[in-house]
Image (cartoon, grey):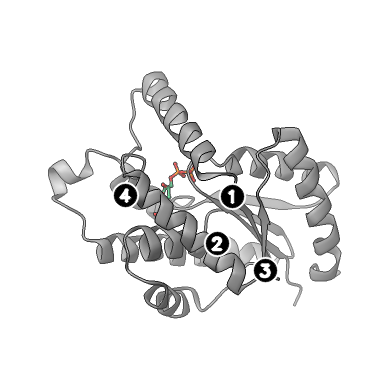
Amino acid sequence: MSRGFFLTFEGLDGSGKTTQLRRLATALEVQGNSIVTLRQPGGTPLGDRIRSILLDSKSEATLGPIAPAAELALMFADRAQAIAQIIQPALTAGKIVLCDRYTDSSEAYQGGGRQLGSSRILAMHAAACDNLQPDLTLLLLPSLEASLRRARHRNHRHTNAHGTDENRFERESDEFYRRIYTAYEAIAAREPHRVVVLRDDASIEHIHQQILHIVATRLPQAIATP
Ligand code: TYD
């Protein structure tokens, strides 16, 4: 059975990973590859419902405070559904899957940010995701200050343009984001082969070129010929 290639993008809100994912998807498609993209939370009908609960800053006005462990379990419910409905079938068909956030986000945000710790997240990953690991993770980690600036600017724009509000996480304190940053650093140090860190605060084009280079060196080894 052929196995595709599973690539995830990680980083703080405002790190530019969504832009880079789109540009990489386009470049790989132009090269003739079959690409599937998705984001977490979301990407499936169930996941989109979970996303609106988790990200809407008005959720807690109607639901009450969301317990960190409940937030974590919802992230994994979303992920398990995405694996079953999208990721695993695409990989089995030999496609390249580009996913905007995956379990590293849970380890960084819920494990680090919400202080639930890494071991709980890794245990849930084994239970809910059958330990499905990305072949490659691109972690965009420019300076914390730069990331925070971009996130605030972006969310301000998003709220203004669409009248919608997905700011539940972005309203958190700088301290919360510092813990996330530290957790991402720890993941990268623990799994240097899987996680490639891009620390550059360079232009979108420059980082795109770096990503193309990294992916070119990793893809051929992993994609099985049909
Ligand atoms: P999104 O608007 O997709 O943010 P971004 O464009 O920065 O990825 O919102 C996703 C938010 O959900 C983001 O703040 C990180 C958070 N999140 C977690 O806390 N845990 C998780 O496991 C995932 C996947 C996301």
| Residue placed under numbered mark 2 in the picture | 185
- Residue nearer the viewer, 28 or 141: 141
Circle 3 — which element? loop
Residue at position x 42%, y 26% from top? 158
In the rendering, at what x and y percent does residue 105 appear? 47, 58
- Please state the horizontal and vertical placement of residue 54, each as a whole percent of the image: 31, 49
Rounded to the nearest angstrom, the CA distance separating label 3 from label 4 is 28 Å
Q: Please report whichever mark, 2 or 3, sits nearer to the chain's N-terminal start.
A: 2
Query: Element type at marker 1?
Result: loop
**Crowd rating for badge 4 (residues with CA inside 10 Å; few <14, some 14–19, many 20+):** many
Image quadrant containing the C terminus: bottom right
Question: In terms of sequence position, does the residue under pointer 1 or pointer 2 come before the other?
Answer: 1
* Image quadrant in which the N terminus is located: bottom right
Q: Which residue is mark 1?
A: 141
Which circle, 2 or 3, is nearer the viewer? 2
Is residue 83 left or right of 215 when viewed as pictured?
Answer: left
Vertical position of residue 46 compared to residue 192: above or below: above
Dots 1, 2 in contact, CB < 8 A: yes
Label 2 element class: helix
x, y percentage for residue 134?
63, 67
The residue carrying pointer 1 sits among few (fewer than 14), some (14 to 19) or many (20 or more) residues within 10 Å by Cα, namely many
Q: Which residue is mark 4?
A: 54
Q: Report how far apart the C-alphas of labels 2 and 3 lie in the structure.
A: 13 Å
Instruction: Give the residue type that dot 4 points to.
Output: Leu
The reply to whether the residue tagged 4 has its Cβ within 8 angstroms of ligand 1 is yes
Q: Is label 1 within 8 A of ligand 1 (CB to nearest ligand atom)?
A: no
